[in-house]
Amino acid sequence: MGNETKRTTIYDIAVLAQASPSAVSAVLNGSWQKRRLSKSLAERVLRIAEQEGYAVNAQASLLRRERSHIIGMIVPKYDNRYFGHIAEQFEAMARDRNLFPVVTCTQRDPELEFEAAKELVSYQAECLISTGATDPDRISAFCKASGVQSINLDLPGTLAPSVISDNYSAARDLTHLIMDRCASDLGWTGPLRFVGGRREDHNTSARIAGFEAAHADRGIAIPEDHIMAQGYSAQTARLLLDDFTPDGPTGLFVNSTISLEGVVQWHAGLGEARTFVRYGCFDFDPFGSFLPGNVGMVEQDVGQMLKRAFELIGVKTGAKEATLVPCRLVKF
Amino acid sequence: MGNETKRTTIYDIAVLAQASPSAVSAVLNGSWQKRRLSKSLAERVLRIAEQEGYAVNAQASLLRRERSHIIGMIVPKYDNRYFGHIAEQFEAMARDRNLFPVVTCTQRDPELEFEAAKELVSYQAECLISTGATDPDRISAFCKASGVQSINLDLPGTLAPSVISDNYSAARDLTHLIMDRCASDLGWTGPLRFVGGRREDHNTSARIAGFEAAHADRGIAIPEDHIMAQGYSAQTARLLLDDFTPDGPTGLFVNSTISLEGVVQWHAGLGEARTFVRYGCFDFDPFGSFLPGNVGMVEQDVGQMLKRAFELIGVKTGAKEATLVPCRLVKF
DNA sequence: ATTCGATGCTCAATCGATTGAGCAAACTTG
DNA sequence: CAAGTTTGCTCAATCGATTGAGCATCGAAT
């Protein structure tokens, strides 16, 4: 790597400005007034620093300072509207609060998740937000041992406070919406199918509970095979549905935009039967409203979730329960 | 912030293990064999480190080491398939190469872009990749002054090597595809409209050039008002199109998925005329193929672009020209 | 003329890990 | 058994910035 030009340090500038390194340091970090340095010295140092293209060595600076102002986040993926939004807003909100955000993407790999968490702790992050982590408690335990605060987002854990969507209520509402539309558009009342996700997942199971509650509200029984939660991928959704060619009106509850891709592929291949299908999706996509048959989507309130998460930062709560954030149901 | 438990250091462990800090350091960073420390000492230290939840202080470590292994990237947005993919793949590829990736999102704000670049340099990044930067040269100049390598991605600069999509060729191909479909589906041959982006942008202007070339290939003149490149947002696209109600067959070249949202909204509101419209989009979205009227999309080859970018890392090329990476045209 | 408080700056210890140099003990070799 | 080698470990300087303490100088007040 480029070794030609050694990075300029305060010592280099001190020589050029005929001042002491301490004075240079004070000028460059803005504490010169407090340290009663003259304006003329400050200006001289700043001019030279500019000329030399000086950039503080964050490692040296952070080593000495007591607070790092670094705040870390791990997310499973970026290439997904929901997590992309989370990462982006997190960075913006952190900057607003004068914190330095470091986000890292862990590809839904539990090992990488933990490694990344350790790395962020090594970088002296003051707080670590684990988003959609498969094993948030392992991370929380490690953070606690290092005296670093941790907060769970999107998926709850038991060792640190969690901020998650109110999956149950939103799923119940979405289910009702789909059933309403099946009734009004197709004149059909019957059990919907639940497609996508994994039963073991906290979020999926809460959504299934909401899905079941809505059916119970209407006194409709759900056949065992209507809950198809064997995985997230578009592939999986399509394969599960390939066996199913509706012989009459039907409705589907789709458990993520990823699964939705598979559902829409299946739907497009249905031919005439296509017009007798209605579905809704738990997750938002701007193109969702243009997909034929789609009656609505649940948009998780990323802004509120992060707001709550930031409120928890630096606060020592004994409370480890999850905060539920309501979702927005978008009807098409 | 949590100050209760001071972080464990090698000195703490040295006391517990009855060894010197140097020995502890060597064990923990894996150089103990080279330094001829005994296996028993190593095991003792590792056990204690584990118990104490030790995490190295990266700041202290990096301050002393000569290489940081940190590699930085700035991206304008995450909540967008293209940039999301870039960030995600970048992180994965960096890890594969034993580098520590730090990505930061700059919201298309030129000031923030530069600030973020400075911060990454402060963190001793060995190389900085500026993705879609509005002013890449300003960043390159700063990097050069600090002896840090910089590489431009997605948008070219003149002070550092650039890796960008072959916008011209892909736009030309996409334009031909749309015109072909207009001819075959609608029996119509005429100039398309170009919607979205900004003329001043390098990418948009290259795409307009390709768009014009395809028209020239067919001897079709483009009326001035058919190039509508006054901004990226969905809003802008919709407002521009609101004045336009096609009285016959038409075709559109849409310059990003963001603009596509606006186009699709407009399209959905057209009523019967809707069936006489065909469009294609420069950018990929998995739901694109389900949008009525959409005949194809250009998918930029993120994998190849990053591969090229990584090949440039650590290489001292005088060459500042841009590498063009071909795109994939997806036909529906 | 002495005392006092500003003013403007420098000294030197420090943060935690790394690393070249060096030292003692144990072990080989002739 | 002396000389040389290997083994196992420690010392102390160092990376670059920060910061409490301290030291002159100067003008004002007594």
Image (cartoon, coloured by chain):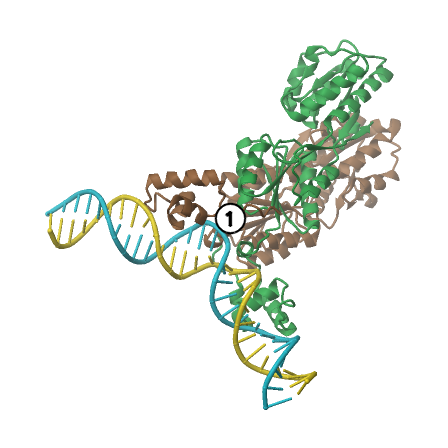
Chain colours: A green, B brown, C cyan, D yellow
Q: Chain of mark 1?
A: B
Q: Is residue B294 above or below residue A88?
A: above
Left or right: where A9 falls relative to B254: left
Q: From this viewpoint, is residue B60 visible? A: yes
Q: Quadrant of residue B212?
A: top right
Q: Residues within 10 Å of mark 1 (few under 14, many from 20)?
A: some
Q: Farthest residue toward the top?
A: A247
Q: Position of residue B27 (x, y in %)?
A: 39, 43
Q: Position of residue B329 (x, y in %)?
A: 66, 33
Left or right: where A118 falls relative to B217: left
Which residue is more in the foreground, D9 or D6?
D9
Q: Is residue A16 above or below residue A214?
A: below
**Total numbered circles:** 1
Q: From this viewpoint, is residue A54 visible? A: no
Image quadrant where one finds the C terminus of chain A = top right
| Residue at 68%, 23% in the rendered image | A204
In the image, what residue type sits under mark 1? Ala
Q: Position of residue B311 (x, y in %)?
A: 51, 44
Q: Position of residue D11 (x, y in %)?
A: 35, 57
User: In this figure, which residue is indicated by the disc labeled 1?
Assistant: B58
Q: Is residue B230 above or below residue A107?
A: below
Q: Helix, strand, or loop for circle 1?
A: helix
